[in-house]
Amino acid sequence: MAKIRLVALAKHYHRGGEVIRALDGVRLDIDDGEFVAVVGRSASGKTTMLGLMGLLLRPTSGRLFIDDLDTGKLDECELAASDSCSRNRTCPRA
Ligand SMILES: Nc1ncnc2c1ncn2[C@@H]1O[C@H](COP(=O)(O)OP(=O)(O)OP(=O)(O)O)[C@@H](O)[C@H]1O
Ligand SMILES: [Mg+2]
């Protein structure tokens, strides 16, 4: 089981009628304890990918799994509490 799994992950930004395909169909598995460096030219989408993996951004399409949990199925409250220590904490609903 991969610790973090990106499946066809895409993030598109919209700016002034233009679509910026910052990420388009990224596939990546990172195992528990694996050390990974993200390298690429400026504007290749490194920060966007890390923002998605940190659950700070929502993907346009694709899936992001952490510990086999499909993060796309989490609501905002659950996203905030989705680190491995607090995933089982109950989120108060408004
Ligand atoms: N909030 C945003 N709104 C619109 N476009 C964005 C936004 N954030 C990033 N982009 C665009 O998405 C693309 C990828 O940007 P990103 O910051 O992920 O690249 P990067 O690889 O981290 O670049 P750098 O090496 O310069 O830090 C760029 O074309 C950037 O202009
Ligand atoms: Mg960056």
Image: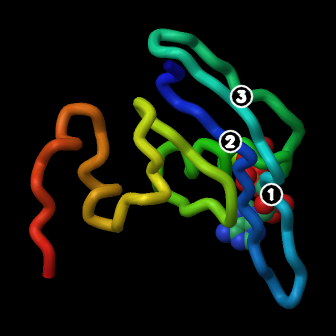
The residue beneath circle 1 is 22
Residue 77 spot, x, y in % from top left: 26, 64
| SS type, badge 1 | strand
Which labelled disc corresponds to residue 34? none
Cβ–Cβ below 8 Å for labels 1 and 3?
A: no
| SS type, badge 2 | strand
> Going from the N terminus, do you reach mark 1 or mark 3 first?
1
Q: Residue at x 62, y 60 (%)?
A: 59
> Going from the N terminus, do you reach mark 1 or mark 2 first?
2
Q: Give the amino acid at mark 3.
A: Val
The residue beneath circle 3 is 38
- The answer to whether 7 is drawn above or below residue 31 in the figure is below
Separation (CA) of disc 1 from disc 3:
15 Å
> Going from the N terminus, do you reach mark 2 or mark 3 first?
2
Residue 29 spot, x, y in % from top left: 64, 25
Residue 80 spot, x, y in % from top left: 29, 56
The residue beneath circle 2 is 7
